[in-house]
Image (cartoon, rainbow, N blue to C red):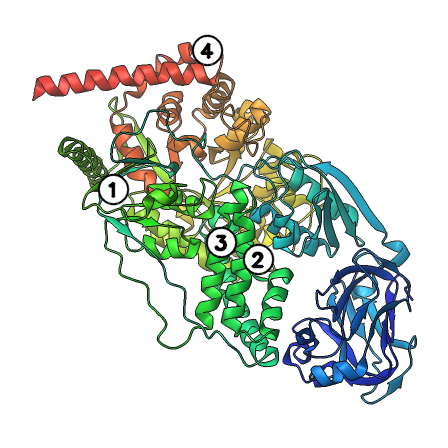
Amino acid sequence: MTTATRLILQAPIDGVVIPLAEVPDPVFAGGTLGEGIALDPLGECLHAPCDGEVVQCARTRHAVTLRTDAGPELLLHLGLDTVNLDGEGIELLVVVGDRLRAGDPLCRFDADRLARGASALITPLVITGAAGWRLCPPHPAAGARVALGEPLLALEAVGGAAGPGAGETGPLRERPLTLALAAGLHARPAARLRAIARGHGVTLRVRSEAGEADAESLSALMNLGLTRGVALTLAARGEEAEAALADAEALLTTPEADDHGAPTPETVPDRPLAEGELAGLVASPGLALGPLVAYRPPLPRVARDGAGEVVEWPRLSAALASVGDDLARAEREARAQGQAAEAEIFTAHQAWLEDPDLIEAARTRMGAGRGAGQAWREALDDEAERLAASGNALLAGRVADLRDLQQRVMAELAEPGAAEDEAVPEGAILLAEELTPSRLVALAERRPAGLCLAGGGTTAHVAILARARGIPCLVAMGDALAGLASERAVLDGERGRLEVSPSPARLAEVEALLAERRRRAEAEREAAQAPAVTRDGREIEVCANVGGSEEACLAAGAGADGIGLLRSEFLFLEGDSAPGEAFQRGEYQAALEALGGKPVIIRTLDIGADKQLPYLRLPAVPNPALGVRGVRLWQSQPELLETQLRALLSVTPLASLRIMLPMVTEAGELRQVREHLEAIAAELGLSERPQLGAMIEVPSAALCAASLAVEADFLSIGTNDLTQYTLAMDREDPELAARADVVHPAVLRLIRATVEGAAGRCPVGVCGAAAGDPLAAPLLVALGVDELSVEPARVPAVKAALRRLDAAALAARLPEFLALDDAAAVRQRLGAWQARVDETTTTLLERIS
């Protein structure tokens, strides 16, 4: 029976009530699977406790999962340790997909046969998926006898409102769509799909010709093998079903831009291989020279046999929980440091760790006598084989992620004296079958010269991490790596070649190239603390973009003249609630102290419909990039701005602080925030005020820069968004990424309009990606910007490039560049100009020497 806020579960069989906490199985008693109750059965047929749909039947017929019409899922587990009977004595009367009414039979069983082979007939009824619902009293007393069909338990919607799909008020919603993800439904979007379902408190399933899968199971989703262009149907049940479907559709129909800089196209050069060369796909560019060293990371040693599921399952549960905590911590740290790619990887790993299909596979093996570690190993071995045999290169590339989880969990269960990692010499080119993400992170600390992998792909997580760390890496090299040996090999990450036996001349050439790159980098680092002054006498501030106080320290060490952008949203992404004033103040103060009095620009919270916070649900909109985000958010969420401004005003010295507002479109928005800032400062009795500035990210702001400059103490151009909005090209669309170029004449004219509008009123900086672009950055300076803000590691190189620049000479050529048709033409003309300048400079230096 179901009402809008209440779900009544009937007794599935005549029996005696046993509280779940008293069930002689720690998995059920500890609530690992969820809340519920148990019965000692007095009959031989289990019945449906309510209306619903069969969504899972155990292969051994001892367990059935129902999705109720109200939304929650129920597990009926016939007896304890009945999995060991392999279905003997049990007749299943339903199949997955059956629609049932309360009281319909689920399975018949031979009580005598089960009593002889199982540890107990006690049958738990567990609410395994109850988002938005909770058990409510009264519960039947222990020892009470109930009859089939009598009310047994009641579930109540949390907060008195209907939970997901509550009966007639929460019907099943469906939405057909065509998958647009270039790489198909792989680990990261599968994890996001699960997060959408959980965030909206709904059950979500994906159906296609290949089959059906619940969003809770990454393995099930990925094993559908869905590729771009496949037609599928999403089915959601819950009060927020429509919102969940909208978010899920946006995820699955928006082409991904999460290759994180993967080299394209994914092919090797056409030039024939020379003798002693092996080809690979370039996963991370660069040049390396060193000995070839085979690397074979050992798996931790675990016990093959166990003491039964009752003993082994709690051990595996504890290991999974421990690894889950580690992954959650790693994800928070990655987001705090602005490492979005790494954070997504850790999120996907957490989802896989909780995958019900993998866990059930391991439990089945524990029931058959395997130890916890061995059961986990075998379950993931089978899943890895399925992915490798899928014929889908991206899915096969996820094998390394499974191996990572396999190794992590097995390490928690390892026997004393388990094998340690073999030594890896610094400066070696490592050869491996595959690497897990966590293994690569550990290896990076040993400073390998490069990596060559037999498997993998350019979109694999290991490739993303290698690029982030600047480690040259080739993948998909096949069996040819086996048995290779060389004291001096060359990994050419520009041409996709491993040169096993380079000639003396080639070795000398590579050594010279590497030496020149090291010399240049060292000279740039030594001069990084000095100002960047162009050849025509203009001093340009070179600041750093950071995600928090730790990166601010790196920026100071790299020679940054200040912080041009501290993305405060990373503080808001760390927890399940908004950070308090004291926590924010601590982070902001640490950033100021790291820069020792240099200016620090902190951008207020830039969040919106395009990137959600778990505790701040904004309505789904057709075009999030044009929705409520940035400074627009303060109209609906004023308490967030209030807390953040108070935290900012409490740092010292305020003379070093700059507060920057994102997504400003007109001067009135800046004026309102300044008035609020003044009121708080007066309330706090402050005599100083920090500078207040605006980001120029939309064409209206660029065209109205003169009026903005009257209100602002500084302006900072966000070139990524300005390019997106000017060219109407979504920067997240990989098919448009190459065309969404900041040097397009239209974008350059808006930048010039900003500089001219602000002239004499306030300085203008650039904190977008263009500030670190070797061709675009000089053009920005020639257009008149006063400051460039780049990633901390780029500061020395950008300063060095500016010292070689004659900004006035380049400015004289601006009319020529602005009259060109498109970005490609500008880049070509700009590159030719730069080459002539470099050639002239070289000639002059040679004459002088």
Task: Determine which residue is flagged by label 2.
Answer: 352
Q: Residues within 10 Å of mark 1 (few under 14, many from 20)?
A: some
Task: Determine which residue is flagged by label 4.
Answer: 820
Which one is earlier in the sequence, the residue at label 2 or at label 4? Answer: 2
Which one is earlier in the sequence, the residue at label 3 or at label 1? Answer: 3
Q: Position of residue 222 (x, y in %)?
A: 61, 49
Mark toward the viewer: 3 or 4: 3
Mark toward the viewer: 2 or 4: 2
Q: Residues within 10 Å of mark 3 (few under 14, many from 20)?
A: many
Relative to 745, say whether 152 is above or below: below
Tell me the CA gap for discs 2 and 3: 9 Å
Tell me the CA gap for discs 3 and 1: 41 Å
Which one is earlier in the sequence, the residue at label 3 or at label 4? Answer: 3
Tell me the CA gap for discs 2 and 1: 45 Å
Q: Quarter-wise, where is residue 577 in the image?
A: bottom right
Dot 2 and dot 3 residues touching (CB under 8 Å): yes
SS category of the residue bearing label 4: loop
Quadrant in the picture for the N terminus: bottom right
Task: Determine which residue is flagged by label 1.
Answer: 529
Tell me the CA gap for discs 2 and 4: 50 Å
Mark toward the viewer: 4 or 1: 4
Task: Determine which residue is flagged by label 3.
Answer: 401
Q: Position of residue 147 (x, y in %)?
A: 91, 81
Q: Residues within 10 Å of mark 2 (few under 14, many from 20)?
A: many
Which one is earlier in the sequence, the residue at label 2 or at label 1? Answer: 2
SS category of the residue bearing label 3: helix
Relative to 476, say whether 172 is above or below: below
Q: Residue at x 34, y 57 (%)?
A: 296
What kind of residue is marked 1?
Gln
In this orientation, does residue 533 appear?
Answer: no
What kind of residue is marked 2?
Trp
In this orientation, does residue 761 appear?
Answer: yes
